[in-house]
Image: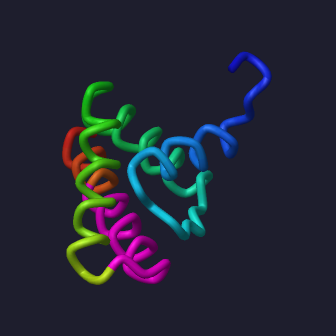
Amino acid sequence: MADMTLDDWVVTVAAELGIKELDLDTESVLDLAAVAAHAVVRPAAPLTTFLAGLAAGMAGGSESDLKDAIETATALCERVEEADA
């Protein structure tokens, strides 16, 4: 496992969860996690990314649905950060 890349891990987890096809922009998910961790609180990162993924799945699960959910969640985090500044 130590030699596994993050993309390899994503494919492994997806397969274990029964996700047959996956075209994931890993960087955008990690960017959302970083914004949530810094703008809100650190534990918000996994929760925010989970909720964005859940919203995308409920909307249909397309790459566009995920992009929209990430953009919406990122914008919310940025608004929270600006309000706290």
User: Where does residue 79 sit, x and y in percent of width and height?
Assistant: 26, 56
Q: Residue at x 58, y 42 (%)?
A: 12
Q: How many marks?
A: 0
Q: Residue at x 36, y 77 (%)?
A: 61
Vertical placement of residue 42 versus 62, above or below: above
Q: Residue furthest top?
A: 2
Front one among 65 and 20: 20
User: Where does residue 66 sit, x and y in percent of width and height?
Assistant: 41, 71
Q: Residue at x 34, y 49 (%)?
A: 49
The magenta stretch spans which residues?
61-76
Front one among 23 and 37: 23
Vertical placement of residue 27 versus 60, above or below: above
Q: Residue at x 24, y 61 (%)?
A: 54
Front one among 53 and 33: 53
The quadrant in which residue 56 appears is: bottom left
Q: Residue furthest right?
A: 3
Q: How is the image coloured?
A: rainbow
Magenta stretch: residue 64 in it?
yes
Q: Is residue 33 left or right of residue 11?
A: left
Q: Is residue 5 left or right of residue 11?
A: right
In which quadrant will I find the C terminus?
top left
In which quadrant will I find the N terminus?
top right
The quadrant in which residue 43 appears is: top left
The quadrant in which residue 53 appears is: bottom left
> Magenta region, mostly helix, strand or loop?
helix
User: Where does residue 16 sit, x and y in percent of width and height?
Assistant: 45, 44
User: Where does residue 37 sit, x and y in percent of width and height?
Assistant: 36, 33
Front one among 13 and 68: 13
